[in-house]
Image (spheres, rainbow, N blue to C red):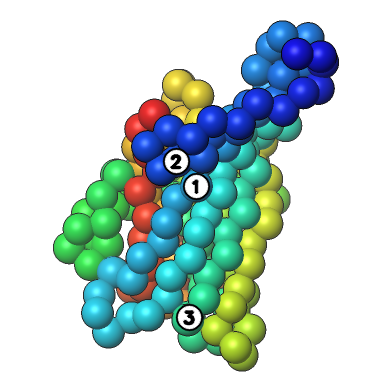
Amino acid sequence: MSHGDLVAKSLTGMAVVVFCTAGTAVAASVDVALQPTDPSFKAQGTVTLTETADGLAVRAQVSQASPGKHGFHIHENGSCADKGNAAGSHFNPDKLPHGDVVRSGLTAAHAGDLGNLEVAEDGTGMLDTQVKGLTLSEGKYSVRGRAVVLHEKEDDFGQPSGNAGGRIACGVIPEK
């Protein structure tokens, strides 16, 4: 295989993509299905997490959500049980205040504070961002085995967790 070739595998319904440069793996990717946390909610979607040399790329696409901004976070536990409450608090390995990790970085905000996903009048929305330092690999900032949560309201970046309201959709990031 020449440098820059793309190798793709499918492992138990999970897409894993590895880019090779001079024989070294530089990027891996997983897809996470977002499902409603309660039968009264309809929001659903897919979140693709891609580890790159520049950090973790996060691309979320949702449908059937109410129009407006919705808080979007990685939570500490890999469970969506109990209407998403089993996902626990925002992923925060350094015990920092709530904020916008995309703008402020891992030294100033919860590692899971991804900001807001904006939903159009037709119920569809997308978030495409990158967080330096987050990873799919092992280590303190690994998001493997955690959950991604779409909240009912806008994250206003207030303390302690952004006032984004209930959890309307949730998906578990695979352990491997």
Q: Of marks 3 and 2, which one's residue comes earlier in the chain?
A: 2
Which of the two marks, 3 or 2, is nearer to us in this view? 2
Kindly report which numbered mark, 3 or 1, lies closer to the viewer in this rendering.
Answer: 1
- Within 10 Å of disc 3 (Cα), the crowding (few <14, some 14-19, many 20+) is many
Write down the residue under mark 2.
Answer: 14
- Residue flagged by tag 3: what amino acid is it? Ala
Q: Are marks 3 and 1 in contact (CB under 8 Å)?
A: no
Q: Residue at x 48, y 80 (%)?
A: 65
In the depicted structure, whether residue 134 falls above or below residue 170? above
Q: Which mark is residue 31?
A: 1
Looking at this rendering, what residue extends furthest in the left direction? 82
Q: Evaluate if marks 2 and 1 touch, with contact meaning CB atoms under 8 Å apart.
A: yes
Give the alpha-carbon distance from disc 2 to disc 1, as whole Å: 6 Å
Distance (Cα) linking label 3 and label 2:
24 Å
2 sits to left or right of 35: right
SS under mark 3: loop
In-image side of 159 versus 76 (left or right): right
34 lies above or below 144: below
Instruction: Residue at 22% x, 54% y: name it.
Output: 86
x and y percentages locating residue 24 in the rendered image: 69, 12
Residue 123: percent from the left, percent from the top?
Answer: 55, 84
Q: Which mark is residue 65?
A: 3
Q: Residue at x 35, y 32 (%)?
A: 175
Which residue in the rendered view is the most extreme toward the right? 3
Q: Is residue 34 above or below residue 168?
A: above
